[in-house]
Image (tube, coloured by chain):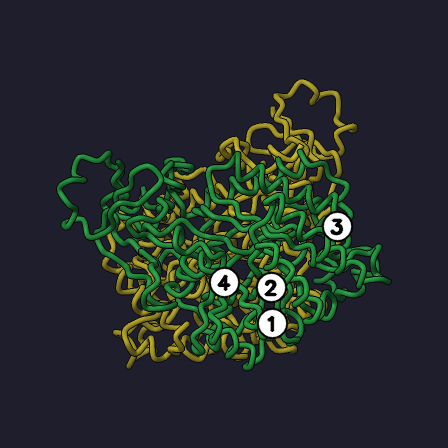
Chain colours: A yellow, B green
Amino acid sequence: MKLIENIAQLATCRAEGGQSEVHAVADAAMVWEGDTIRWVGPRRELPAEYQGAERLDAGGRLVVPGLVDCHTHLAFGGWRADEFTQRIEGAGYLEIARAGGGIARTVRLTREAGEEALYRRARAFVREMVALGVTTIECKSGYGLDREHELKLLRVYRRLAESEPVGIVPTFLGAHVVPPEYRERREAYVALLVDQLIPEVAARRLATYCDVFVEESAFSVEEGRRILLAGQAAGLASRLHADQLTSCGGAELAAEVGALSADHLEQVSDRGIAAMAESGVVAVSLPIASLYLGSTAMPARRLIGAGVGVAVATDFNPGSAPSYHLPFAMTLACTLQRMTPAESLKGATFFAAKALGLEQRVGSLEAGKAADIALMDAPDLQTWLYHLRPNACLLTVARGRIVWQAPDRRESGELA
Amino acid sequence: MKLIENIAQLATCRAEGGQSEVHAVADAAMVWEGDTIRWVGPRRELPAEYQGAERLDAGGRLVVPGLVDCHTHLAFGGWRADEFTQRIEGAGYLEIARAGGGIARTVRLTREAGEEALYRRARAFVREMVALGVTTIECKSGYGLDREHELKLLRVYRRLAESEPVGIVPTFLGAHVVPPEYRERREAYVALLVDQLIPEVAARRLATYCDVFVEESAFSVEEGRRILLAGQAAGLASRLHADQLTSCGGAELAAEVGALSADHLEQVSDRGIAAMAESGVVAVSLPIASLYLGSTAMPARRLIGAGVGVAVATDFNPGSAPSYHLPFAMTLACTLQRMTPAESLKGATFFAAKALGLEQRVGSLEAGKAADIALMDAPDLQTWLYHLRPNACLLTVARGRIVWQAPDRRESGELA
């Protein structure tokens, strides 16, 4: 049994109260046993039965639920840094694609990469994410785009789930774009996904979710519907890349098929927002991509106003969002999407967990839930997300185990 | 004598070639002795006389000049995180100021803070900055706004310059805003600055520069001119906060008085740009403030196009730019100001040094200059600034001494 105490502020982030209510407890304590939380509350109310637990001192700092990154493309070959420079110099998406760049380039590099190399690289990313306080990571395939290489990516995620002490939840995104070799026969690619790959991925238990990029340059609403329903038939819950570049009905489709989440939504329509609210679909905002693409941010205020829960994730990928820094994405959600720090935190914890259908287990600090905890070097939530630092996380606990501890020298060490 | 080798890319950032030319050397090596660089070049050309030097292995990574943060408000009391939330919720600058917030609040908290506490806190910030690869830091007063507390801040900087192994260069910013107690008699405050504080600060050698915030809400062009000329008469070089919120002639004044730099410039006029180009004034861009205020970014492309050198700095302060993460500011200069990674690096090295009048000593890797070096965990400059990480810096050398070394576990350790 373990007890963490001397917590200046603990944000439980439990469901009640919606986006802006993080249920902050001052001078808090928390007890866990094995991988499960036993008790959370004001320190003065600590039940006698827990007084003997092994004690950790939070040093008068902030404790939040282990963060949930509910949208990443974690395993891929190569980088595309030169395209970053080309975009700054004015090159358009199509121009870069015509020169062999864009997603197709990452597909090429990912197909060339060995499974072991992809695993080691993704593992290094995971470890850096854990040091930031992240304890659950959704990971998409989608840079293989054929049987061999999609399965290779999903096996990398399975291996990570086994080797790393945090939650790794895999998504099959065979429907990322139509691969080059199917450009003239896209129907055959959709058929490959629906008839072969989705059933095989599900049968091998290599994915929990099925995702589709619904966009003019990727898959139509009709194709998306077919793919997502095939996923559901095989037991894979639905999620979508929706309305990123154009308002093309992705949000409406998410609501129609009962998807867990619709992600991006920079161009979502009012009708799409209403449909999502009605169906309880979570909107996943990806502000790092908005920053890197110089595009409009997701209209988070309109979504929240309509009653849609908004998650915040990194979208980590080698093109439009080359950063896995989730607290940085959370600060960007404040500056670019006008979400308050409380709304942003609830978005990277409870609503991110809900976007994964895991809210019964992770994303909030409550008795009975997973002991996933991050200790931040800040006196409170507002200060943490406003004072953007390289890394404010001092301690990460995943499933009850300490999986990251910062070196000693930290700002607050000097702040007494 | 020390030698660093196995450098995949070394960007010397020397003056020639302007903003976009960083003079990258592939498979480079560098030699220094004491605090001074002796030789830089391709490894195969290393002169025989240096073969016996003590060797450091860069591991096939990127070496850049120690970064120069040429605009910070490093020492202050308190934070203003609640105002961050209030701004997100729609509160305006004036509304926050009327409620006792804004700069006036930091002035109150800074006056209340003891010198020792301010020193320890600023020292902690400096050490985190050094871990990011920063080796020269400009530090402004301006939250004291009376004799006692302005001198207190400048003494904090003097003490930092003595205790910390990096360059700390102080700026007197008594003309930050008119303090509350002078609101009805601003002329008396300007007279205090010009007749008493500037001469005293200069006589005590507590500052190198004199800065003025030229803005409708702060000081007029006429007041700014008087203050800057008084500074010059006392031996303090000029720098300005110019054209941040309104285009009010700050850039033109900077050119007229021969200032080293004009900073902010979000609203700079074409006339101001032409005048700066003519006079060789460096434009200091502060993209973190643009992000946090949701304002237009400095028109870097127009400035560079006109031949003005553009520096990149953090503007670290507790209101509009609560981050000292200079590499993050450099990435924002790319995304928000459309500067290429090369232009951004030259902005945080050579042009930042020029903005401080220190380009003969720091800001580039050349024989005879200070051995200020940062080793980044990236194969090249583009990848470093595009793949935004908590901290990519593995090693910081300042004046020839290793002042920061990262713990072992880093991405590239896994990338072999």
Front: mark 2 or 1: 1
- Name the residue that disc number 3 marks: B107
Say which amino acid is labelled 2: Leu
**Subunit under mark 4:** B
Q: Which mark is residue B240?
A: 2
> What's the distance in space between the residues labelled 4 and 3, CA to CA?
29 Å
- Name the residue that disc number 4 marks: B332
Q: Circle 2 — which element?
A: strand
Front: mark 2 or 4: 2
Q: Which badge, 2 or 4, comes first in the chain's sequence? A: 2
Q: Which badge, 4 or 3, comes first in the chain's sequence? A: 3
Horizontal side, residue A373 vs residue A245: left or right:
right
Say which amino acid is labelled 1: Leu
Tell me, yes or no, if residue B108 can be seen here.
yes
Relative height, residue A119 to residue A283 (above, below): above
Front: mark 3 or 2: 2
Instruction: Determine the residue positioned at 56% across, 66% down.
Output: B262
Q: Circle 1 — which element?
A: helix
> What's the distance in space between the residues labelled 3 and 2, CA to CA?
20 Å
- Is residue B407 or residue A230 the one in the foreground? B407
Say which amino acid is labelled 3: Val
Q: Residue furthest top?
A: A52
Q: Which badge, 3 or 2, comes first in the chain's sequence? A: 3
Horizontal side, residue A103 vs residue A336: left or right:
left
Q: Which badge, 1 or 4, comes first in the chain's sequence? A: 1
- Name the residue that disc number 1 marks: B253
Instruction: Determine the residue positioned at 58% across, 40% down.
Output: B158
Q: Residue furthest right?
A: B184
Query: Residue A10 location, x and y as percent?
Result: 69, 40
